[in-house]
Image: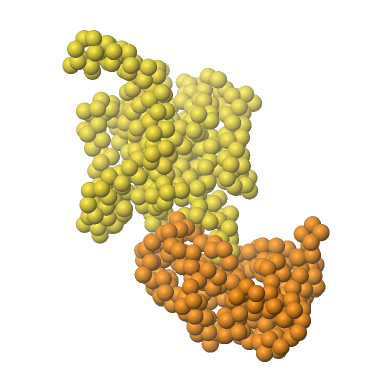
Chain colours: A yellow, B orange
């Protein structure tokens, strides 16, 4: 059993199966509509990439939304100038965000700890402000970058795709990118992203990144130049963010500056910490919970609450509704905030630490499995700090 | 025999304090050279100047004919001068095996190697080597434990393993047995003697006279930032200046 879970193949088969059947098993909790599923997959890619930097090296970037935004803008420009086919859009988005993260990473990584975080935050906010003001010719400022009928779409023109009166939609060689096909397209990238992350976690390179997190000074005296290690991890995670940004544009072809705002950067930090930084699955759990709260909890209203507490006597029902109503609808942030506080205080290794504690409680054989698959690195050690 | 390390005219001041003044020291290849001296004499400062943690105000540190001053710590490591730290500088979140594999990977991969798709569990050669070095220092039983969870004495031995696995030309040992129980100390002495036969040069900073006199070929005595004597263990034992500066104090401690 233990060996089975150690093999990459088994993990990937299980992971792929879980992702591809998501529309089925998410249906009972009302989360199986394509819009939300797409968000799960896209933010999953974003968080997996972020975790390669934050989880492995411990460098907390507060500016990853900038790469997300760059990915989106690049993808939309590709739709406008080249083709509505999503493939060139994604490729260009990953390349451009990679170059952009190389630049920001090179400068930000001159500092570590809180100064690194502040530098990345400053860069991201600068990008956001520029996108809003000076760069309006590229970003279309406040309105956001959108498709228009006048766009040239050179490649589409060359291969003879007819120009229609309505705006064309994004496609992958003819397959539309809305609804479930959009989700499955994003899901393929989620699986690829997960595989890359798994390989990195289990490589000597990944171990060196963990060693940098543990004691960077010692790494330098042990014969490693830590700068290129950190920079490469930063660029990889920046490219993942760019990929996620382009997928956003693929499913909904517009890009706005608000995608680069610091709240978006903060969101991925929350997701990673909530799920369990430095673990393979943790960031995905965080994505699932936060996106679920954002979309489902925020939609609950008083009537829905009355329905939920229907089984109680009328007096009690009203009391329960009054108590719980601040936590749903507009107040979903309150629930999320409370959940986040509980996790950080009691489970500093995130939800994954909770699972490994639970499995330790239920016998040793379970424990071995979870230690391998679940807490790939030191979510546990983090918890003890 | 040639000199592997030549320290010439090294001065280092911190504010008004002369931590090191006019240090001249030649380390012969293949020998164990001990540096002793009372607390605050500048022993650790001297080592820090060798491995690039501190930059001396004047002077030169020539290692195999190359000046090491101003070089990056990782380049000094790859040149073949490796330090074992006094306060354990290990990787607390990694297992003992991983802690030992890291320096072995450094030796193989150089200062940077981007191989995110290589498979760690297939690095059999590196892992076997690490296990054998862990066995040498008596830590192979704990190979899968997190290094942060072992005792201080064990951390010292892990430090030693991390230095030894790189098989450097010159190993700088900063109080390798401090905080160890007596039988562990003896075991470490035996281990260091065994490695000496392989031709690794070592500089040892030590308080424990038992360790110094059972290992060292040459001893230098450092007091108030100056080298007041260098010689064989017998010469040092009988040197009146040394007795006054150091051994007297040591006798009180014991």
Is residue A4 in sight in this rendering? no
Is residue A20 in sight in this rendering? yes
Q: Compared to B222, does A16 lie above or below?
A: above
In front here: A257 or A325?
Answer: A325
For residue B124, side relative to residue A211 (left or right): left
For residue B20, side relative to residue A167 (left or right): right
Q: Compared to A68, does A5 lie above or below?
A: below
Residue at image x 31%, y 31%? Answer: A37
For residue B116, side relative to residue B201 (left or right): left
Residue at image x 72%, y 81%? Answer: B243
In front here: A73 or A316?
Answer: A316
Residue at image x 68%, y 74%? Answer: B249
Residue B64 % position (x, y): 68, 78
Q: Compared to A280, does B59 lie above or below?
A: below
Residue at image x 42%, y 74%? Answer: B138
Residue B212 % position (x, y): 60, 81
Report which quarter residue B128 is drawn in: bottom left
Residue A47 % position (x, y): 42, 39
Report which quarter residue A206 is drawn in: bottom left
Residue A341 % position (x, y): 42, 33
In front here: A40 or A310?
Answer: A310
* Residue farthest toward the front in the current orientation of the protein: B252
Q: Quadrant of the N terminus of chain A?
A: bottom left
């Amino acid at each position: 059993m233990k060996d089975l879970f150690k093999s990459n193949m088994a993990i990937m088969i299980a992971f792929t199966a879980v992702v591809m059947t998501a529309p089925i098993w998410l249906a009972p909790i009302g989360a199986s509509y394509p819009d939300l599923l797409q968000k799960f997959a896209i933010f999953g890619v974003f968080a997996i990439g972020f975790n390669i930097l934050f989880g492995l090296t411990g460098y907390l970037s507060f500016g990853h939304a900038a790469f997300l935004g760059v990915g989106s803008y690049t993808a939309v420009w590709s739709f406008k100038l080249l083709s509505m086919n999503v493939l060139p859009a994604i490729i260009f988005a990953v390349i451009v965000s990679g170059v952009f993260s190389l630049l920001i990473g090179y400068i930000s990584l001159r500092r570590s700890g809180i100064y690194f975080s502040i530098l990345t935050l400053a860069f991201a906010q600068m990008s956001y402000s520029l996108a809003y003001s000076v760069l309006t010719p590229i970003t279309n400022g406040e309105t956001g970058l959108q498709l228009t009928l006048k766009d040239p779409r050179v490649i589409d023109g060359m291969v003879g795709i007819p120009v229609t009166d309505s705006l064309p939609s994004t496609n992958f060689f003819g397959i539309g990118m809305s609804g479930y096909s959009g989700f499955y397209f994003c899901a393929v990238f989620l699986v690829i992203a997960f595989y890359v992350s798994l390989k990195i976690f289990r490589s000597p390179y990944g171990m060196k990144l963990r060693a940098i997190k543990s004691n960077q000074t010692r790494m330098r005296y042990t014969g490693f130049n830590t700068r290129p290690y950190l920079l490469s991890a930063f660029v990889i995670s920046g490219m993942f963010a760019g990929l996620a940004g382009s997928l956003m544009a693929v499913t909904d072809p517009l890009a706005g500056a608000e995608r680069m705002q610091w709240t978006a950067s903060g969101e991925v930090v929350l997701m990673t910490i909530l799920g369990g930084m430095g673990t393979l699955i943790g960031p995905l759990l965080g994505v699932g919970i936060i996106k679920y709260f954002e979309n489902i909890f925020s939609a609950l209203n008083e009537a829905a609450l009355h329905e939920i507490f229907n089984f109680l006597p009328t007096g009690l029902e009203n009391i329960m509704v009054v108590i719980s109503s601040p936590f749903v609808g507009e107040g979903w942030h309150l629930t999320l905030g409370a959940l986040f506080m509980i996790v950080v205080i009691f489970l500093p290794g995130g939800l994954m630490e909770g699972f490994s504690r639970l499995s330790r409680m239920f016998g040793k054989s379970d424990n071995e499995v979870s230690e391998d698959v679940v807490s790939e690195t030191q979510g546990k050690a983090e918890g003890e700090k | 025999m040639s000199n592997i390390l030549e320290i010439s005219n090294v001065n280092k001041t911190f504010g008004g304090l002369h931590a090191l003044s006019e240090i001249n020291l030649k380390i012969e290849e293949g020998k164990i050279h001990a540096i002793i001296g009372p607390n605050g004499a500048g022993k650790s400062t001297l080592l820090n100047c060798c491995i690039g943690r501190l930059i001396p105000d004047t002077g030169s540190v020539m290692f195999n004919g190359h000046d090491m001053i101003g070089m990056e710590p990782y380049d000094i490591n790859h040149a073949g001068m490796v330090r074992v730290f006094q306060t354990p500088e290990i990787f607390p979140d990694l297992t003992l095996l991983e802690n030992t594999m890291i320096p072995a990977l450094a030796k193989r991969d150089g200062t940077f190697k981007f191989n995110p798709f290589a498979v760690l569990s297939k690095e059999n050669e590196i892992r076997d080597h690490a296990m054998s070095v862990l066995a040498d220092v008596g830590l192979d039983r704990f190979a899968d434990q997190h290094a942060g969870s072992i005792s201080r004495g064990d951390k010292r031995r892990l430090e030693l393993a991390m230095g030894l696995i790189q098989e450097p030309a010159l190993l700088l040992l900063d109080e390798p047995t401090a905080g160890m129980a007596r039988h562990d100390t003896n075991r470490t002495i035996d281990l260091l003697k065994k490695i000496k036969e392989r031709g690794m040069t070592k500089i040892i900073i030590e308080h424990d006279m038992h360790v110094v006199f059972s290992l060292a070929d040459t001893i230098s005595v450092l007091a108030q930032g100056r080298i007041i004597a260098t010689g064989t263990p017998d010469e040092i034992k009988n040197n009146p200046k040394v007795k006054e500066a150091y051994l007297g104090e040591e006798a009180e401690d014991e």
